[in-house]
Amino acid sequence: AWIVEDINLFQTRLRFVPTNEVASISNGSIAMARIVNFARSPNALITLYFQFNKNASRETIAIFFTHLERFVRDRPSQWDRILSFQLIKIHSTHLQYQLRLRHKRGWQEAQFVSTSKAEMLDLCDDAIKMLMIEWDSRTLRVAIEGNLTSEDD
């Protein structure tokens, strides 16, 4: 997300939160763009996506969710609550889930929200590995049709 640092008659100075990069753009170039005022959004909403291997049982995923609930409950100054955790797509090789959370702070405090998000991702990564439901995309097999020949032939 970009945060507005300064506005004058001709240009706007923005900061990209993840990298701390600063950019100045002309106001005319953003006149027709959709601009969200995060100051009016009291709580940051976070969406995370997870891919579990296709053999992950409902019980194992329920245990994973219990870890998430405990993590949120143990950090009342950071997280307001879990809004949803749902299966959104079944692939032939894996299951895709979506987690929606509401943070206690707004996007005006993006550094704090980003740190909380990173901590959540670390917990999720550890839980996925502990429960052995990790999906390894490197195990995909690619079918190559036709003949492969070297340039020396």
Image: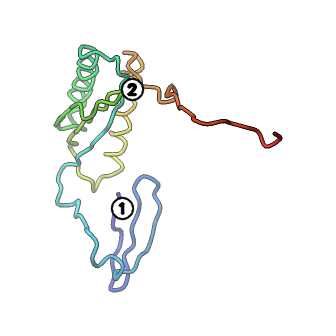
Residue lying at 36% horizontally and 85% vertically, measured from the top left: 10
Identity, as a three-letter code, of the amino acid under mark 2: Thr
Identity, as a three-letter code, of the amino acid under mark 1: Trp
Of mark 1 and mark 2, the one earlier in the sequence is 1
* In this rendering, position of residue 83 left or right of residue 125: left
Measuring from the top left, give residue 119's x and y in whole percent: 37, 34
Q: Secondary structure at mark 1?
A: strand
Residue lying furthest bottom: 9
Q: Secondary structure at mark 2?
A: loop
CA–CA distance in space, label 1 to label 2: 35 Å
Q: Which residue is mark 2?
A: 93
Measuring from the top left, give residue 143's x and y in whole percent: 53, 31
Neighbours of disc 2 within 10 Å: few (<14), some (14-19), many (20+): some
Quarter holding the N terminus is bottom left
Residue lying at 68% horizontally and 36% vertically, measured from the top left: 148
Marks 1, 2: nearer the viewer: 2
Q: Which residue is mark 1?
A: 2
Q: Quadrant of residue 9?
A: bottom left
